[in-house]
Structures are given as structure tokens and as C-alpha cells.
């Protein structure tokens, strides 16, 4: 299988994929593959087209290019954030286009990139409060990846097909 993203957390390697073609949802059923102590296992997701995952305070966040962000807690309770219960934007309603390309954990919460949205960067705090951010340049509507640095800056890598660049917030 093709892997889009690998994340290491507490002695486990997590993998999601496959890679999206031209950032168009392909509706591939979502699976989170894990590698622990020499063995691979797989867990199904409620979403398709998984793009990234992050951990915060014993919770697993999984993103989808089409369905938003899935949250699983330590008891394996499931919650999906999309346009109905968060400021995440659906770029083509009524179809499922809550396109999340990246997640990045940081002190106190998770950064979320919403591809194709005016408010393309979101902060989801540990207490589940959302803070959306918008920027003036059109290219900032198309983030591909997020990285945080030692000074708590968020770096957004922007889609070269949409103008490209890097934005630091």
C-alpha cells in the first residue's frame, strides 16, 4: 500500500495513505496502520482519504481530505469535526469536501490546515475551542503541510499549483 504520512508516537509507528492525486478526494476507505514490536495492525476510520495524524493528551486526531478531523480518546470514543460542528469549511457543499491536508500538535492543542478555505488555518485547543485564521494572499487558501518550530511559530507549506510558498504564523 502507498503511505502518505508516517508519525512516530510512544514506540509506535503510525501510517496513513494513500497519496492523493492532485488533491482530489478519491474516497479510499480510511485505515490507520500501526507498527509496534515487529507487528503491523490496522484500525478502520469513519472517514476516507486520510492525510495526517497527531496526538495530544492521550487523544488521536486523524485528518481526511473530504471528511474533516476524527478524534479518538483513550476510551476509543469517536468524534468527527466537520462544517456542522466546527469552523472547518466545506469547499463544495452538499458533497463531502472538508479538505484537511495536515495536523500539527503544539503546546495546548492541535493546528489544522483546511485546504481550499478562506480560513485555512485553525487552532483546536485542548478544551475543544476552535480559533480560525485567514490571510490576505490567495495562495494561503491551499496549505499542504504544517510544521511548528521551537518558538511556537506555525509554518504552512502552500500548494505550488496554487501559487506556492511558505507562510509563517
Image: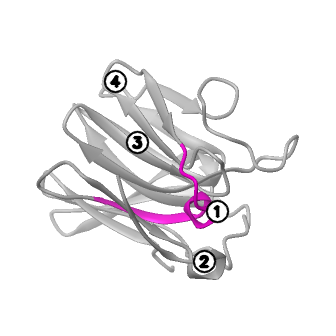
Name the N-terminal-most of marks 3 and 1: 3
Render colour scheme: one colour
Counting residues from the N terminus, which is met first, the one under dot 1 or under dot 2? 1
Specify whether 13 is left or right of 136.
left
- The residue identified by callout 3 is 61
Q: Which mark is residue 138?
A: 1
Q: Report how many numbered discs are placed on residues in the image.
A: 4
Q: In which image quadrant can residue 81 be found?
A: top right
Q: Nearer the viewer, residue 147 or 80?
A: 147
Of the numbered discs 4 and 3, the one sitting upstream in the chain is 3
Query: Which of marks 3 and 2 precedes in the sequence?
Result: 3
Task: Specify the label residue 163 is tagged with.
Answer: 2
SS of the residue under disc 1: helix
Q: Position of residue 90 (x, y in %)?
A: 73, 43
In the image, residue 136 lies in the stretch drawn in magenta = yes
Query: What secondary structure is found at the residue carrying circle 3?
Result: strand
Disc 1 and disc 2 in contact, CB within 8 angstroms: yes
Measuring from the top left, give residue 104's x and y in whole percent: 33, 51
User: Which comes sooner in the sequence, label 2 or label 4?
Assistant: 4
Amino acid at each position: 500500500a502507498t503511505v502518505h504520512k508516517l508519525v512516530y508516537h510512544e514506540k509506535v509507528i503510525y501510517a496513513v495513505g494513500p497519496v492523493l492525486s492532485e488533491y482530489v478526494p478519491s474516497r479510499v476507505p480510511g485505515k490507520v496502520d500501526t507498527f509496534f514490536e515487529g507487528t503491523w495492525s490496522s484500525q478502520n476510520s469513519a472517514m476516507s482519504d486520510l492525510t495526517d495524524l497527531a496526538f495530544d493528551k492521550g487523544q488521536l486526531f486523524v485528518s481526511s481530505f473530504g471528511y474533516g478531523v476524527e478524534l479518538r480518546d483513550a476510551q476509543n470514543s469517536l468524534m468527527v469535526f466537520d462544517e456542522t460542528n466546527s469552523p472547518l469549511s466545506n469547499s463544495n457543499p452538499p458533497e463531502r469536501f472538508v479538505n484537511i491536508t495536515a495536523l500539527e500538535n503544539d503546546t495546548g492543542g492541535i493546528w489544522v490546515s483546511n485546504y481550499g478555505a478562506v480560513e485555512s488555518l485553525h487552532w483546536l485547543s485542548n478544551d475543544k475551542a476552535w480559533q480560525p485564521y485567514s490571510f490576505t494572499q490567495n495562495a494561503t487558501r491551499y496549505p499542504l503541510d504544517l510544521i511548528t518550530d521551537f518558538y511556537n511559530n506555525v509554518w504552512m507549506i502552500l500548494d505550488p499549483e496554487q501559487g506556492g510558498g511558505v507562510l509563517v504564523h
